[in-house]
Amino acid sequence: MIIEDVRNLLSANDRIASENRKRFARWGAYVVNLMSAPGAGKTTILEQTLFHLHDRYRLAVIEGDVRGSYDRDRLNAVADVPIVQINTEVAYGGECHLDALMIANAIGDVDLPGTDLVFIENVGNLVCPAEFDVGEGCKVMVASVTEGEDKPLKYPLMYSVCEVLLLNKIDIAAAVGFDRAQFLHNCHSVNPGLTIIELSARTGDGVPAWLEWLESKIRS
Amino acid sequence: MHELGICRSLIDVALAAMAERGTSGPAKSLQVEIGRFTAVVPDSLRFYFDVLSRGTLLEGAELEIESIPLRTRCRSCAQEAEPELPSLLCLTCDGVVEVVAGRELRLVSIDVPEEAA
């Protein structure tokens, strides 16, 4: 007997993601799912973001790491913002990405009705997180100039699922021989609608444009 | 390595489908479609399937994976293409395309021999 039963393998994840999204919407919290390769600068960008916005908006962070709370400790030092740590090694088999269930479990610990903006810092990885909807309002990725201009072509799925790309470490672009025009061309070829914000989280250059983008989302 | 989670989902979905039909198994094979524009490696999925299916009605079943090519359609000129490169621009008019195939991650069917059904 052939059981014809076409089912999406991510349907369980997508169902939970949709429930997460409804919960976020009900509380009016805008959610950014921040993804990148390890070391691209997600945490440094979040340090800048929390520093500049924590006085004006109610923020929360969900930190995803395989192990440790190094990022949470860094963010705690910048601003008094609720941070929930997910260690995938502890409860989720050391998974290399966050999925909707992990976020559903984590948001029980966030005071959502009192939050304007939730940042989800995903596990550093350019492959797996691209596949998992967690219920975010927007997928944002960070690429750094040190990674090279060919990465949109090597990781097209990640580059194509994101709405915004933060190009980080532009202060050292010349030193590492980064071909900006080629990078922008490669981004365009895999995701023509991608919004690109160039910045340096270390010097603060370009950060205002990112903050403006976030504020436009909070207001809308 | 997220094939582990996707494989868990595959097994849950397949066992639920068999339970709904009242089949007591064991299954002989599962037909699965994996798009090329996904982050799933078929061999990795097979490896996890062999491990995770043990002790279930799916143990020993063949995982038949059909790889679905990336297929795009231009929003401007409607030209369809199967691009080899990751470029998601129309090769004819340079317009923006939509992905019409290649993102599949799905269980299509399960073969359960009659005597076991």
Image (tube, helix red, strand yellow):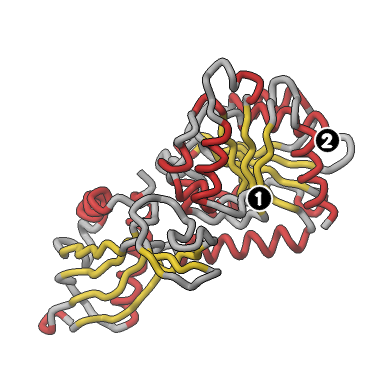
| Above or below, A47 relative to A122 | above
Q: Nearer the viewer, residue A105 or B83?
A: B83
Q: Residues within 10 Å of mark 1 (few under 14, many from 20)?
A: some
Residue A86 appears anywhere in the view: no
Q: How far across and down, in percent of the image, does residue B116 sit? A: 14, 79
Q: Tell me the amino acid under the disc marked 1.
A: Ile
Secondary structure beneath label 1: helix
Query: Outermost residue toward the right?
Result: A56
Q: Which residue appears at 83% of the width and 35% of the height?
A: A54
On the rendered image, what quadrant is the C terminus of chain A found in? bottom right
Q: Nearer the viewer, residue A190 or B8?
A: A190
Q: Kindly identify which chain the residue marked by label 1 belongs to.
A: A
**Residue with the mark numbered 1:** A107
Q: Quadrant of residue A153?
A: top left
Q: Which residue appears at 52% of the width and 24% of the height?
A: A146
Q: Residues within 10 Å of mark 2 (few under 14, many from 20)?
A: some
Of badges 2 and 1, nearer the viewer stands: 2
| Above or below, A3 relative to B28 | below
Q: Nearer the viewer, residue A209 or A62?
A: A209
Residue A94 appears anywhere in the view: yes
Mark nearer the N terminus (2 vs 1): 2
Q: Tell me the amino acid under the disc marked 2.
A: His
Is A143 left, or right, of B16 in this rendering?
right
Q: Which numbered circle lies on residue A70?
A: none
Q: Quadrant of residue A41?
A: top right
Q: Which numbered circle lies on residue A54?
A: 2
| Above or below, A142 relative to B18 | above
Q: Which residue appears at 53% of the width and 61% of the height?
A: B95
Is A203 left, or right, of B26 in this rendering?
right
Q: Which residue appears at 66% of the width and 47% of the height?
A: A195
